[in-house]
Amino acid sequence: MNSFYSEDELKTLGLKQIGRNVLISRKCSIYGAENISIGNNTRIDDYTILSGKVYIGDYVHVSAGAYLFGGLSGIEINDFCAVSARCCIYAVTDDYLGGGMTNPMIPMEYRNVIQETVTLEKHVIIGAGSIVLPGVRIAEGGAFGAMSLINKSTKEWTVYIGTPIKEWKERKNLNEIEYKFRMSESIKRE
């Protein structure tokens, strides 16, 4: 037995949308499949959790043990992104400052849940063990060192490190390489 779902099995998961050439580990946990869209040429590895509203574009890799908690606001991961092992992306969290009680076993009227969309634009790479907090918009080409705390929106084509993140250096723009790649892919299809 293959460790990834077959194409026929993927169709039975109840996902909102599923592209071509998608590999999802049989050990991936999916909650709210009807709110999850996955593009073409995407791979999701073992022990990953997808929960709530999640959009994943084309040519994306979500490594083992990554957790994507989209809630109602959602997580948007655009084309050519990589989410490394043990990363957590939160579009939803409890208020830790005492605005309400915490944890999903408490009725909502006693909680203060914060929900804000998280967006990863094209060519973002998030290093192992990093955390992305609600409301963050990671600009195109953002790269983050291992164990980064991404608690604010970022600039394009910049490398960040640290907890919380700080700018480290510029990153080379990959749009020309992407263009060549897309041209070679379109030639293959002809």
Image (cartoon, grey):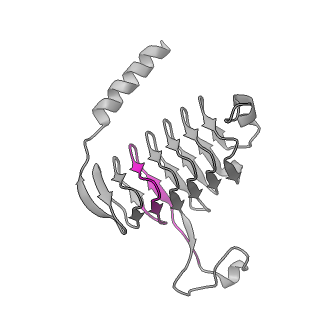
Q: Is residue 155 visible?
A: no
Q: Is residue 94 visible?
A: yes
| The N terminus lies in quadrant | top right
Residue at x 61%, y 55% (from the top left corner): 53
Q: Residue furthest right?
A: 12
Q: Does the stretch in magenta take in 9?
A: no
Q: Residue furthest bottom?
A: 98
- Decide if residue 165 is on the left or right side of residue 115: left
- Decide if residue 19 is on the left or right side of residue 123: right
**What residue range appears in magenta?**
113-136
Q: Please, is residue 110 above or below residue 19 in the view? A: below
Residue at x 69%, y 43% (from the top left corner): 15
Q: Please, is residue 140 above or below residue 164 in the view? A: above
Tell me residue 32's x, y (percent). Answer: 70, 54
Residue at x 40%, y 26% (from the top left corner): 182
Q: Does the stretch in magenta take in 117?
A: yes
